[in-house]
Image (cartoon, rainbow, N blue to C red):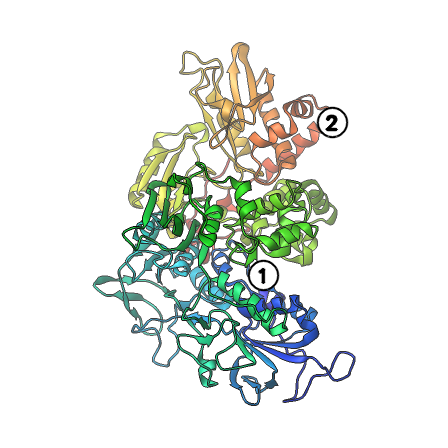
Amino acid sequence: MGSVAERVQAPAQARVHTPPLARPRSRSGGRDSRRRLVVIGNGMAGARAVEEILARGGAEQFSITVFGDEPYGNYNRIMLSHVLSGAESDQDIFLNPLSWYQDNGITLHAGVRADRIDRFAKQVFSSDGRVTPYDVLVIATGSRSHMPPMDGLYTPGGSVKQGVFGFRTIDDTRKMAAHAQQEQHRHAVVIGGGLLGLEAAAGLRSFGLGVDVVHSGGHLMSAQMGPDGGAVLRRSVEALGIGVLTGCRTTAVLGTDRVTGVSLRDRPDIECDMVVVAAGIRPNVDLAILSGLPVERAIVVDDSLRVQDEDDIYAVGECVQHRGEVYGLVAPLWEQAVVLANHVTGTDTGAAYLGSRTATKLKVAGVEVASMGLHGPELETDEHIVFSEPSRGVFKSIVVRDNKMVGATLLGDSRKVAYLTQAFDRGLPLPEERTGLMFDLGTPGEETGIAELDDDAQVCNCNGVSKKALVGAVKGGCTSVSGAMDATRAGKGCGSCKLLVRQVVEWAADGAVEEDPAAAYYVPGIPLDKQALMAEVRARGLRSVSAVFQALAPGGAEDAKSKMGLASLLKMMLADRYIDERDARFINDRVHANIQRDGTFSVVPQMKGGVTSVQQLRRIADVAEKHNVPLIKLTGGQRIDLLGIRKEDLPQVWADLDMPSGYAYGKSFRTVKTCVGKDFCRYGTGDSTKLGIEIESRFQGLESPAKLKLAVSGCPRNCAESLVKDVGVVAVEGGRWEIYVGGAAGAHIRKGDLLATVDSPDEVKVLTGRFMQYYREQANWLERTYAFVPRVGIEHLRAVIVQDAEGIAGRLDEAMQASVDSYVDPWLERDDPQTPGQFRTSLPLTALPQVPVR
């Protein structure tokens, strides 16, 4: 399928060609009596201003024309880092697709730049040769990436050097992702340690690149927090495997035609294949300067957002300077758009924008950050309350002046942000016990806090959604959290406000919130529950993930978050009839290793039942020595884990090991933990080792809704911890075996339920397979057995699996056998040749392990 630009956002054409100075015709064919509103800029601020104007009856007053540099509709720039990392598709971040402009009668000149404004003739001259008259003009040209002065950014011909990127647009993001995926590229340098730079670094890290962030400031995110918070943030960022250099300037980009490295002042050069410049933004004011408008740091406007000394020209967003301030955050843009729309439409000519108290709540490289006001005390009388827990990445700082909160920084824990935001905005009196500002010690609870939150308080900064808007959506008929989010866009940005959104919706609905319909979907991109989805797959003969999307997804749109769940389900249903598609696999499944926080990988060779040999141990030791493996760890599942292996080294590591994968990744059957059993243990009553190996050999690597961990213990002393596994088997007196299901011993702890007591190992294998097949068919995606078993009930499971009360036991056995028979060692799949891009290496397929599975 094509890109979003090809499928959804193809370059737009003008809806109407308007001759210079001529009034457009109305839809009825007569002359249009509406005034002509022209908006220069189709970014977040410009489109939001149009939305606010339309909400005030602007479509009746104005014929609206919009110019945008990019050949798309309006999208959320805040979400570009999610697109870069693959967490969202570019289609997901569009706020107003091209159809929205058509539906609202807006003429959109997408991909057309406005070059000059004739203020006296009231005309806009654009790059396509068009002259467009206006009665009211709104300038929303936004900002651009700042390229700091350094040598080597450009080639002798004047073009940006290959491998150098800004990070501002969808096209920037697509180019960065394409460059990062090329096999020969291994290391990136991000210039700038602010919000955008850290997001870019985290996104590039997901491609397996080494990444260094070079920041000229003394600490990360210096615009949002002080040095103590920056130090804690640095620790969290470095834990992701991202290098951080602060107090450091980049002086040159090395290489003739393409990037080969960067030079730093007073530091050694860094070799790299890619440079991302995220060193801040600069307002786009060239058009305003050329047109003779007043410009200082940005376009100067008054409290009505009217350009100084102009009656019919307004400006909004990052290109605006108001009372000496230029804002680069989203929330002020929304506030400006409201005031502008009130004046343009005449709804409230007394409305005034008096500036914004900036309070931000974001997720930066997966870390929650909230910041408002001062970063630290400025006066001797200021109180400064600080809590720091660097090992958990938590930092809290609150500044109090005259018993009013004048600043706060929250890192890694933003549960108190709603209360602190209203205390900051409204100057609320603070509790005498100051620790109550950081923890729930006498301060208002969530319900009280939401009730007292101002109607105009921003709940979602990314999309400018207030408490009032959310409450209005609930009162207007939205009965679920997802419905309110869809209606208002709240929670559709970085996602850090979702808890607060839920609290507001539940408060507004007085607790009467319906379950989201999407909660029943097996995967988010297909509006069907699991059984209906399986029925459709069978009825339509669908055999691949792309075929399912084409047939069952709304508009045939693919959803990145749904691919892994669909691939697992189809493999379970179709066995060897499933058509594998590489882009439906998670990175772990593609490289047969487990990605770690620092971007390296963990390799776990298979040792069935935890049993190994001298030859295997020697081979593992040789591989660890040859590849300088930094950590060798014995896992809780009785396996040897080789950690810290680079992605490009994985093929050779597997080739040198010459052992099958132990499946310590993915949503599948994993390992069987065993004790030594009756051959060696004086307490043993059953051969747990032999049975464990047989179970692991039979079911290895089979797909399931979530991971499956098993254990076999040779006596009731339960040394293999069988009672807290997804399936656990325990030998008891008389040569019998007890089978337990639904146990857990991780973040959730649950003792498994006794499914059955049987007389032989063969019966154990039959009932184990039958239970797992029923779970594979009935469980929700990512639902572990410790949730599935109590949900369906152990009595029901006994009836279906042991007693065959529904008459499906034979079918379950046959389905499991089909899956077992179709299993192939992933390294030997004939239709899955290793490609250079997979591991960033040109290792031939013949070098991969050739070990049969059974």
Say which of 354 and 2 sits in front.
354
On the rendered structure, is 569 left or right of 324? right
Judge whether 67 appears above or below 432 on screen.
Answer: below
Q: Quadrant of residue 131?
A: bottom right
Kindly give the residue lying farthest to the right in the view shown.
28
Judge whether 695 appears above or below 54 on screen.
Answer: above
| Residue 362 visible in image | no
Q: Mark 2 highlights which residue?
A: 807
Mark toward the start of the polypeptide (2 vs 1): 1
Distance from disc 2 to disc 1, alpha carbons, whole Å, reads 46 Å
Tell me where residue 342 appears, x and y as whole percent: 60, 69
Residue at (66, 85) in percent of width and height: 18
The circle on residue 91 is: 1
- Disc 1, SS: helix
Residue at (56, 47) in percent of width and height: 564
Say which of 678 and 478 sits in front.
478
The circle on residue 446 is: none
On the rendered structure, is 260 left or right of 819? left
Q: Residue type at mark 1?
A: Gln
Tell me where residue 248 appears, x and y as whole percent: 26, 62
